Image (tube, helix red, strand yellow):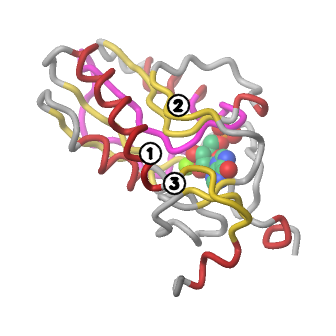
Amino acid sequence: MKNELHKDVESILVSEEEIKEIIDNLSSQINKDYNGEELTVIIILKGSLIFASDLIRMLDMPVSIEFMRVSSYGAGTSSSGFINIKQDVECDIEGKNILIIEDIIDSGNTLYKLKEVLSERKPKTCRICTMLDKPERRVADVDVEYQGKVIPDEFAVGYGLDYNENYRNLKYIGVLKKEVYTK
Ligand code: IMP
Ligand code: MG
């Protein structure tokens, strides 16, 4: 292994192979549920970018893509309970089927607030698809319609997920060594 990033990874949480299976499962469910109806996906930057790009290529309805950037974490490893919208969608979502694509749900605070904000704009439907879920850490009671994999309370990096903007380009999802973020 040449990649320098591997040395900070304690163990592999989701392998490349398992990521493919997760995407196959989620896309089948989504294709079945929307049954050809148009869908607007909102990709939550930056962490969901890689997951979303793989997922949406497996969808078979007409899909349009929007991006949002919301801050919750800063440089640390726990959420702050409010969101700050740093970049908003460019379209009017009223009457549209909205699917929010998120990398991971931890406390649930980010998505709880985001769903609240987007629902006020009167979409036809507004659902959430997350690749990973850490239910042990949940604080906000948010409904998640599509959930890739439940993981334990560990700090995950790779496949879009970062710590301090690093590790997003790992092809798998791993547990970050504690010594890296307690330094
Ligand atoms: P929540 O508001 O606590 O649910 O935080 C959700 C956001 O925190 C996610 O979109 C991630 O950006 C970040 N996050 C939560 N857990 C992890 C993790 O294990 N690794 C990397 N980012 C995480
Ligand atoms: Mg994120």
Residue 7 horizontal/vertical position (percent): 68, 78
Residues drawn in magenta: 85-111
> Please, what is the three-letter code of the amino acid marked with disc 3?
Ser
- Res 128 → quadrant: top left
Left or right position of 9 against 62: right
Residue 151 is a magenta residue: no
Q: Give the label on residue 91, or none.
A: none
Q: In this view, does 41 lie above or below 144?
A: below
Q: Residue at x 11, y 30 (%)?
A: 62
Q: Position of residue 115 (x, y in %)?
A: 50, 24
The residue singled out by tag 2 in the image is: 114
Residue 9 drawn above or below residue 81? below
Q: Do the residues labelled 1 and 3 touch (CB within 8 Å)?
A: no
User: Which residue is denoted by mark 3 in the rendering?
Assistant: 15
Q: Mark 1 points at which residue?
A: 44
Q: Viewer-proximal residue, 66 or 4?
A: 4
Quarter of the figure with residue 22: top left
Residue 171 shows in the view: yes
Q: Dot 2: few (<14), some (14–19), or many (≥20) neighbours within 10 Å?
A: some
- Decide whether residue 98 is among the magenta residues: yes
Crowdedness near tag 3: few (<14), some (14–19) or many (≥20) residues, C-alpha within 10 Å:
some
Q: What residue type is labelled 1?
A: Ile
Q: Which of marks 1 and 2 is nearer the N terminus?
A: 1
Label 1–label 2 contact, CB within 8 A: yes
Number of on-image labels: 3
Q: Circle 3 sits in a helix, a strand or a loop, which is it?
A: loop
Picture residue at 37% right of the left edge, 21% below the top: 121
Q: Give how far apart the Cα atoms at labels 1 and 2 are.
A: 10 Å
Q: Distance between the residues labelled 2 and 3?
A: 29 Å
Q: Circle 1 — which element?
A: strand
Q: In which quarter of the image is the C terminus?
A: bottom right
Nearer-the-camera pick, 163 or 133: 133
